Amino acid sequence: MKKQQPQITEDKILEASWGLLGEEGIEKFSMRRLADRLGIQAPSIYWYFKSKQNLYQRLANQISKIILDEFSSEGNWKVQMEELAITMRRVLSRYPCSTQLMMMTLPHEPDMIQFTNRMLLCVESTPLEQEQKLQAVITLTNYVFYFVLDDYQHQRNIAVMQEDEVEFPGGQMNELLDSMTEAQAGLFRGMYKSGLFEVMWTDQAFEFGLKLILMGIEQVIKEHEK
């Protein structure tokens, strides 16, 4: 008797996609690997998604909806922008490779459009020009994307080194820094040896960078009000 393929749905494909992204990363993601994970033939996926890019669009749309659902929109523009950034970071950190997906896709899905519109509404009450409002939102978004992506890549690098049983190059790094002059590496050496680079992906670091951006926007607003 011919073996019957498992019943699949669009939701099952999306769920399996997140699992595959978490295990393999976006670099190794393929429709064939996804089909293997689902126990089906790859062509079956194309009944639901006409291409891998189309699947990426739907995954990014899903992330946009989750951010919207978790975002609290109360308060003035500054409070809303801060909450938006924190919510984005929380959701993007929860779903593997979601930052890359958001960067690789266009806002051509309903929830992605609504998400972009909601971001713009955060600064709509300010006296900024429309172009400046858009730039403020883009700057904030790019900051969150880079922060989450950098943290993700750092964790993957550590995981690869642990898997390959590679010794962390702490001793070699110290030797290299000690061999360099004060002019060449003095500030870097002091920060490295005091452990400051270990806080790069912490809540404290994120909040400080966010504060700099919000203060910058606030300063531009004050200049408009003069």
Image: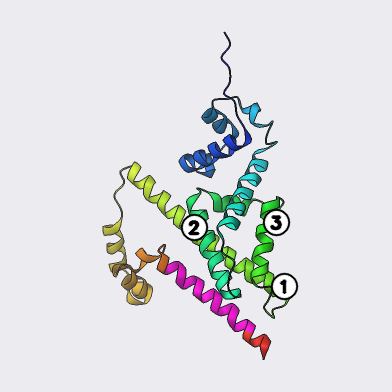
Q: Within the image, what quadrant is residue 187 found in?
A: bottom left
Mark closer to the observer (3, 1)? 3
Q: Is residue 21 magenta?
A: no
In this view of the protein, can residue 179 be seen by the observer? no
Instruction: Measure the C-alpha gap from mark 2 to mark 3.
Output: 20 Å
Residues marked 3 and 1 touching at CB (< 8 Å): no
The kind of residue on which mark 3 rests is Ile
Write the residue at 51% across / 42% down.
21
- Other-residue count near label 2 (Cα within 10 Å), few / some / many at <14 / 14–19 / ≥20: some
Q: Are marks 1 and 2 in contact (CB under 8 Å)?
A: no
Specify the color scheme: rainbow
Secondary element under disc 2, as helix, strand or loop, is helix
Name above or below for residue 117 compared with residue 24: below
Residue 113 in the image: x percent, y percent?
70, 56
Q: Please give the residue where the numbered disc 1 appears in the rendered image.
A: 131
Q: Position of residue 33 (x, y in %)?
A: 54, 32
Q: Which residue in the protein does label 3 denote?
A: 113
**What's the magenta region?**
205-221
User: The disc labelled 1 sits on which kind of residue?
Assistant: Glu
